[in-house]
Amino acid sequence: MGAPVLPRKAMKAKEPLRILCIGLGGGTVPSFYAESLPHCQVDVVELEPAVVHAAKEGMGFREWPNLRVFLEDGVTFAQRKVQEGATDVGVYDAVLVDAYDPDGNVPEALWNRGEGLVEALSDGLLRRCGVVATNFLPHVDLAAPLAAYSGALSSHGSGRSFSIQVNKPVDPENDLEKIFDVEGTGNRIAVHICGAPPELADGPLPVLEDRLKQEAKKVGMATGCVWDMPDLACRGLRDWPAVQAADEVKIFSM
């Protein structure tokens, strides 16, 4: 998307790569960004103080100069940043949602049309070439959230919605696989990119897959990542065309 991710590009960038993570969990995802990407400012919003305490005391999480944690509701935080405009924090290159209610579902305020985060995206939370991604349980129909994100970011230029599948245990006897396994898939990450070049926004899925693999390989090599980044970036890749997503939303709401 043109954001300054790789080290050589980051050193030339006038502004840091800005990432908003809604939901801390154990802190491994924001820590990876802050430690591995040299020109990156990560803001994490977590509602529950107990989660922050557990991450710091039990999982070794710590804040860095470029990694800040805010104890606040994620929607409230996002809306406030939009109201502040281009301040010290400003708008973000990526908004990543990994937050759940007590039942294990992503709160509707973080994905539903007309709700808080979608409105913040529409009002300018994301930069014109950016990414919003949300981690959903495998049974969730992604048509509604992706249609909501796409509609909110329609003014940002050409966009594309797709999803990938997270890794799952390879041992079929592993109980964890049974917990997260629905129709052979693990959690799915719903992704919408905005301000995309034509070949990514409108090209066939193999073109997007090839570009994802190329860029994932570069990032993996630059960060010294031990995981197979191209595989992770494209596992279970599926297209969600805007028209299809909108039609499915209409059917779902009838």
Image: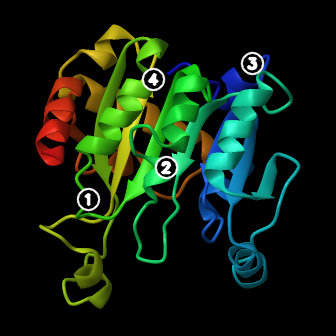
Residue 84 visible in the picture: yes
Gap in angstroms between the C-alphas marked 1 and 4: 22 Å
- Residue at image mark 2: 110
Kind of element beneath mark 4: loop
Gap in angstroms between the C-alphas marked 3 and 4: 24 Å
Within 10 Å of the Cα at label 2, are there few (<14), some (14-19), or many (20+) other Cα atoms? Answer: many
Q: Nearer the viewer, mark 3 or mark 2?
A: 2
Within 10 Å of the Cα at label 3, are there few (<14), some (14-19), or many (20+) other Cα atoms? Answer: some
Q: Dividing the picture into quarters, in which one does residue 30 lie? A: bottom right
Q: In this rendering, would 150 be left or right of 89? A: left
| Residue drawn at 17 percent across, 24 percent down | 243
- Residue at image mark 4: 153
| Residue drawn at 52 percent across, 26 percent down | 122
| Residue drawn at 64 percent across, 52 percent down | 74
- Residue at image mark 3: 13
Mark with earlier residue (3, 2): 3
